[in-house]
Amino acid sequence: MTVGRRAGRAHSDVNHLRGEVWQIEIRGRPAIYRLLFAEEGRYQQVLLALEVVNKKRQKAKGQHIELAEQRLADWIVRGTRPTR
């Protein structure tokens, strides 16, 4: 992750999936994981983890991307509500 942090989106393990959803592959000891995330905050300084799945296939499944998009939409709605 340190190398990915330094290289940012240019790192070979970081891929754009759809809209604001990105993925990074994380190599663990027993398996490879796929972390779906979005950049949030005024200067995109926050990486919002939306979904983590065990990588069993070459491409991310549509259902995982859709779930990540739903979670991001929920995050955005909750962040824009006026406080009382």
Image: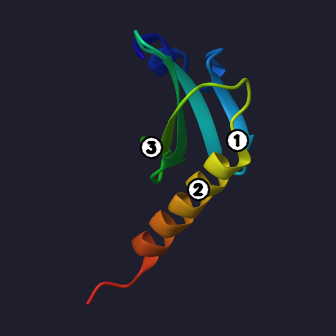
Which kind of residue does numbered mark 3 sit on?
Ala
The image shows residue 55, relative to residue 21, as above or below, that is above
Mark 3 vs 1, N-terminal side: 3
Neighbor class of circle 3 (other Cα within 10 Å; few <14, some 14-19, many 20+) is some
Q: Disc number at residue 61?
A: 1
- Residue labelled with disc 3: 49
Q: Which residue is drawn at 60% across and 33% down?
A: 23
Mark 2 vs 3, N-terminal side: 3
**Secondary element at image label 2:** helix
Q: Which residue is drawn at 70% across and 35% down?
A: 16
Mark 2 vs 1, N-terminal side: 1
**Residue 83: percent from left, percent from top:** 30, 84
**Residue 67: percent from left, percent from top:** 58, 56
Which kind of residue does numbered mark 2 sit on?
Leu
Mark yes or no: residue 48 visible. Answer: yes
Neighbor class of circle 2 (other Cα within 10 Å; few <14, some 14-19, many 20+) is some
**Secondary element at image label 3:** strand
Rendered-image quadrant of the C terminus: bottom left
- Residue labelled with disc 2: 67
